[in-house]
Image (tube, grey):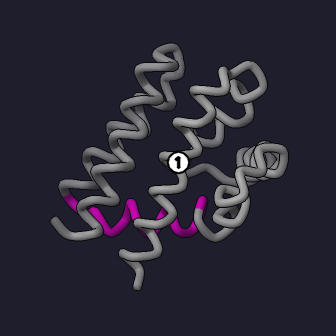
């Protein structure tokens, strides 16, 4: 399996977990559908979007698990631009303050793995 395929699979698994945890968030379901379609037609698009909207502005924050700065960044991005990764940002803005430590840990792990796979796929 290529690094790009591993990245896309991991991103889809992340959105599936988010959908299971927050079924009321329609944007997560829509984001998951968009990712699944993009994986079939243009998987590189998923990587490029993640790189542009998550990795570049937030990699350091993810690696240091700086949730305060991530929540601030999520609010700024949500106010200024729309993209298919919005559901990830909604989680930080809407649910993070009341989320269990265990759920936070799972999200950090997904984001950390996605950032590392992004680096490898772009190398």
Q: Which residue is mark 1?
A: 85
Magenta segment: 41-54
Residue 92: x, y in percent?
69, 36
Horizontal side, residue 90 vs residue 2: left or right: right
> Is 79 rendered above or below residue 106?
below
> Is 24 rendered above or below residue 26?
above
Residue 78: x, y in percent?
71, 45
Q: Residues within 10 Å of mark 1 (few under 14, many from 20)?
A: many
Question: Which residue of the protein is positioned furthest toward the bottom in this rendering?
Answer: 123
Horizontal side, residue 48 vs residue 101: left or right: left
Residue 22: x, y in percent?
51, 19
Residue 99, picture quadrant: top right
Residue 122, picture quadrant: bottom left
Which residue is drawn at the image coordinates 64% and 64% (left, top)? Answer: 59
Which residue is drawn at the image coordinates 28% and 50% (left, top)? Answer: 9
Which residue is drawn at the image coordinates 68% and 53% (left, top)? Answer: 81
Quadrant housing the C terminus: bottom left
Question: How many numbered circles does the render carry?
Answer: 1
Residue 6 is inside the magenta segment = no
> Is 55 rendered above or below residue 67?
below
- Per the picture, the main secondary structure of the magenta-coloured stretch is helix
Residue 43, picture quadrant: bottom left
> Is 48 rendered above or below residue 76?
below
Quadrant housing the N terminus: bottom left
Which residue is drawn at the image coordinates 44% and 68% (left, top)? Answer: 118
Horizontal side, residue 15 vs residue 91: left or right: left
Along the line of sight, the residue nearer the viewer: 70 or 64? 64
Horizontal side, residue 82 vs residue 27: left or right: right
């Amino acid at each position: 399996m290529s690094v790009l395929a591993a990245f896309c699979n991991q991103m889809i698994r992340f959105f599936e977990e988010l959908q299971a945890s927050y079924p009321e968030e329609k944007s997560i379901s829509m984001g998951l559908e968009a990712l699944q379609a993009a994986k079939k037609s243009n998987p590189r698009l998923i990587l490029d979007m993640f790189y542009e909207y998550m990795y570049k502005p937030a990699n350091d924050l993810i690696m240091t698990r700086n949730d305060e700065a991530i929540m601030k960044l999520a609010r700024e991005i949500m106010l200024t631009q729309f993209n298919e990764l919005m559901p990830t940002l909604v989680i930080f803005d809407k649910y993070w303050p009341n989320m269990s430590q265990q759920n936070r840990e799972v999200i950090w792990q997904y984001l950390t793995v996605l950032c590392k796979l992004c680096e490898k796929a772009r190398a």
